[in-house]
Image (tube, rainbow, N blue to C red):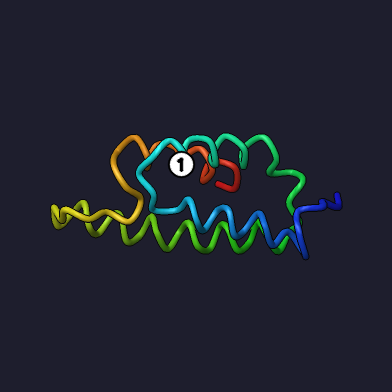
Amino acid sequence: MRSDWGRDDLMVVAAFRYCLGRQTYIVGDCADWMVANWDKFNANTQSVIRRDLEVEFENDDIARAENRDYKSLGHDCDRREWEKVRALYR
């Protein structure tokens, strides 16, 4: 399905990358929007999101295992929001 979110879903990727790692309400809003619109994103966009998100889950897992203050997915509540997006392709 074709979308009109910028060149090849450019705005989808830009919004996702802006929100990734934030620790505000925007994480939940972005995740909910992505869940609602996932089937409208082209295959390349889904692939980029999947790749970027998996890298951040790996980094976040390491940070949590090492009890670091900074976690790339934010607080537990932020991570839970990204898990909703992750569930789309797992």
Task: Please indicate whether residue 10 sits to the left or right of residue 4 in the image.
Answer: left
Q: Residue furthest left?
A: 67
In the image, 72 versus 51, the foreground residue is 72
* Residue that numbered label 1 is attached to: 27
Going by the image, does 45 lie left or right of 90?
right
Which residue is rendered at x = 35% and y = 44% of the image?
Answer: 23
The x, y position of residue 41, in whole percent, is 73, 51
- Residue at 30 percent across and 38 percent down: it is 76
Q: How many marks?
A: 1
- Give coordinates of residue 50: x percent, y percent: 56, 57
Dividing the picture into quadrants, the one containing residue 66 is: bottom left
Crowding near the residue tagged with mark 1, few <14, some 14–19, many ≥20 C-alpha atoms within 10 Å: many
Image side of residue 83 versus residue 62, left or right:
right
| Label 1 secondary element | helix
Front position in the image: 72 or 10: 10
Q: Residue 9: x, y in percent?
A: 73, 59
Residue at 54%, 43% (x, y): give it: 85
Q: Residue furthest right?
A: 2
Measuring 55% from the left and 41% from the top, which residue is drawn there? 30
Q: Is residue 40 left or right of residue 58?
A: right
Which amino acid, by three-letter code, is at mark 1? Val
